[in-house]
Image: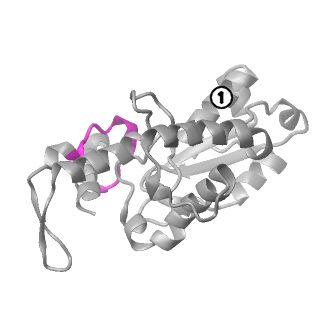
Amino acid sequence: DYLTEQSVAACAPLDGDKDNVIAYPPACDFTAASQVGTTVACENGIASTVTEYDAAMWDSMRRGPRTKDGDFLWWGMEPGASLDLWAAEPRDLISIVSAWIRDFLIKDTDYDIADIGLDQYTSLFAEAVAEYSDTWGSDDPDLSSFKERGGKFLAWHGWADERIPGMGSVHYWEMVKRALGGLQEVDAVYRLFMAPGALHCGIHFGADPTDVNVLVDWVENGVEPET
């Protein structure tokens, strides 16, 4: 989409490379508000103008969910993450969100989530955390037992992931670092690599880090992964 392309054009050069990839999206200060009034030639040949509503929607998806008072709930999509899939595959993506809210939170399979306002959304967010974290949560930072058994945890996340915000993985790594006692301790057991330009599961023009031999070398030969 146009706004994503503009965010890449504005922030990809920040690292000095002409590779059309944003190396570190959190440093990108592009906002869609800067594009309000711009006329865009769409692929269908129809000209479209970026409205204040369009810009506010894009910027809100980048900012992530907030309460009515603006309090943080979770991270949003980084600049460079394409929003095309949300428009092209609503049955696949939106239905997951709808089913989660209807079936597990409201517990009414016929409920229309279009009726949910921000106050109710905020309440449902808190309810989901309270009701399901202990059962399904995957954010326990205490990897001490795993470390004692000689386990190694190698993870990567695409900065341009359009489905799961990358800052969630960064946040978890920070939690583990604090739980284990510092950088040296976490490096001995858990390495996280953020892949510039990579979408969900690495589908994009950026990195596609899928070589499991790096993990094998770390576990079996003590070769620590640096990239």
The residue positioned 66% from the left and 45% from the top of the image is 225
Is 7 on the left or on the right of 218, as rendered? left
Amino acid type shown at disc 1:
Met
Q: Give the range drawn in magenta.
A: 17-32
Mark 1 surroundings within 10 Å by alpha-carbon count, few (fewer than 14), some (14 through 19), many (20 or more): some
Q: Residue 47: give x, y in percent of width and height.
A: 10, 70
The residue singled out by tag 1 in the image is 175
Q: Residue 28: give x, y in percent of width and height.
A: 31, 39
**How has the structure been colored for display?**
one colour
Q: Residue 26: give x, y in percent of width and height.
A: 39, 37
For the residue pair 209 and 144, the one nearer the viewer reads as 144
In this view, which residue lies farthest toward the right? 149
Work out whether residue 226 can be spotted: no
Rendered view: 36 above or below 29:
below
Residue 49 lies within the magenta run:
no
Q: How many callouts does the rendering have?
A: 1
The residue positioned 69% from the left and 47% from the top of the image is 154
Q: In which quarter of the image is residue 76?
A: top left
In this view, which residue lies farthest toward the bottom? 44
Is 127 on the left or on the right of 112, as rendered? right
Rendered view: 36 above or below 213:
above
For the residue pair 227 and 34, the one nearer the viewer reads as 34
- Identify the image quadrant of the N terminus: bottom left
Rendered view: 185 above or below 94:
above
* Main secondary structure type of the part rendered in magenta: loop
Q: Residue 202: give x, y in percent of width and height.
A: 52, 62
Work out whether residue 175 can be spotted: yes
* Label 1: which secondary element: helix
